[in-house]
Image (cartoon, rainbow, N blue to C red):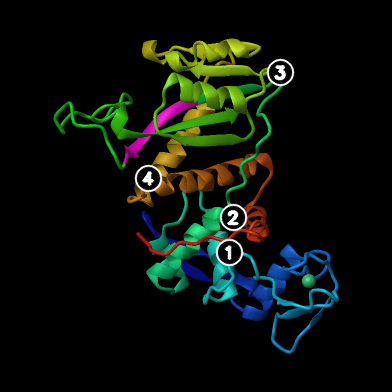
Amino acid sequence: MLYYGHRKGTMVMDTFSAPHFHNEEAARKSLEGLLWPSGPVCAHCGTIDHAYATKRPGVYRCAEKECRKDFSVTTRTVMERSHLKLHKWLQAFHLMCSSKKGVSAHQLHRTLDITYEAAWFMAHRIRECMRTGGLGPMGGTGKIVEADETYFGRTSEPKPLKKPRTTPYTKKGWKGKGAARAIVALVERGGNVRTFHVAHADKETVGGIVATNIAHESRLHTDESRLYTEIGNLFSAHETVKHSVGEYVRDDVHTNSAEGYFSIFKRGMRGIYQHCGEKHLHRYLAEYDFRYNHRIALGFNDGDRAALAVKNAAGKRLTYRQPH
Ligand SMILES: [Zn+2]
C-alpha cells in the first residue's frame, strides 16, 4: 500500500501491491515479459531469442557470431544508465499513466522517495514514451473531426506590451494573442486527439495542420473562427457553431470533445505543472494526448496504459542535462 499527497488531500493507492512494484527481480521479469514477449531481443543486432544468460542478473549475451554483445532489458531504453531501481520506474509509469491530470515531479519525488532531480528526469523520460502520435489522416468518410485552438500560458518571447498588465485574460490573449502559447487540437468524435503547439495560431499555420492531418472525406466541426473558413472547403462538410451568440450544440454539430480535452489539459497544467517551460510544452501535450487516446471509454484501463508506455520505452533515449 502506498500513499501520496494529492491537492485535495491524501489519496490511498493500493494498486501497488503487485510484487513488480516492490521487488527488483519481479520488476525485471515484468519488464522482460512486456518488452520481450518472444524471448530476449539483442539490443545491438536485434536478434530475437538467441542469447544466453550471464552470471550478472538480467544480463544476456548475444549468441550471434558477429555480435556476442551483452545487453539487458533496459539497454537502449529510457531506463538505461539510470541508477533508479526498476520497480520505482514501474511505479512511476503507473502513476503517470493512471492519473487523469498527470503527476508532478514533486509528487514522484515524494512518493518514490527519490531526489527531485531524479524524479524530473524520470518524468520527462516517461513522457517521451507517451509520445505515440499517429501520422495517418484522422477521420474519414462519415466521420466527424473537431478542430479548435486555445491559448495557455505565456510564450518565452512575448511581443511588446501594448496594454497594461491588468488587462484580464481572455481567449484573445492576455497582452494580445502574440504573448500566449497557442495550442491547436484535432479530435475525432469518439476517438483520438492530436495536438500541436504553434508559434502563431494564424490561418496559414492552423489551416496547414487541419489540411494535412484530417482526411478530406470527414466532416469538419469548428467554431465560427475565421481561421477555418477557407480550409473548411476542403472537407465533405464544414459545420460551425456560433459560440459568440451562445450556440454550443446544434444537432450533432459541436466542438465539445476538443473543449473537453483543453479543459483537462488546463486544469492539470495549472494544478500540477505550474512552471512548464515553453520548450517542453509539446512533451506535456503528448502526455495528455496519450492518456486521452487510451482512455477508459476506448477500452483501456490503467494497467493497459502503463504497459503501452513501458513498451514504448525501447528505443527512446533522451539527453536532458538540467532540471529547470
Ligand atoms: Zn546481437
Q: Nearer the viewer, mark 1 or mark 3?
A: 1
Of the numbered discs 3 and 4, the one sitting upstream in the chain is 3
* Number of other residues with Cα within 10 Å of mark 4, as a class: few under 14, some 14 to 19, many 20 or more: some
In terms of secondary structure, where does tag 3 sit? loop
Above or below for 6 versus 86: above
Name the residue carrying label 2: 129
Label 1 beta carbon within 8 A of ligand 1: no
> In the rendered image, which residue does mark 3 sit on?
142
Residue at image location 47% in from the left, 44% down from the top: 282
- Tag of residue 278: 4
C-alpha distance separating marks 1 and 3: 40 Å
Q: Secondary structure at mark 2?
A: helix
| Identity, as a three-letter code, of the amino acid under mark 4 | Glu
Magenta span includes 100: no
Of badges 4 and 2, nearer the viewer stands 4
- Any mark on residue 233, and which? none
Quarter of the image for residue 109 reads bottom left
Q: Position of residue 312 (x, y in %)?
A: 65, 56
Distance from Cα at disc 2 to Cα at disc 1? 8 Å
Callout 3 crowding tier (Cα within 10 Å): few <14, some 14–19, many ≥20: few
Q: For marks 4 and 1, give the CA distance.
A: 22 Å
Tell me what residue is drawn at x 51 percent, y 21 percent.
207
Q: In the drawing, what numbered circle is on residue 78?
A: 1
Residue displayed at 18% across by 31% down: 161
| Disc nearer the start of the sequence (4/2) | 2
Label located before the other in sequence (4 or 1): 1
Q: Nearer the viewer, residue 125 or 9?
A: 125
Q: Is residue 314 above or below residue 284?
A: below
Q: Quick one: which residue is furthest to the front in this view?
A: 66
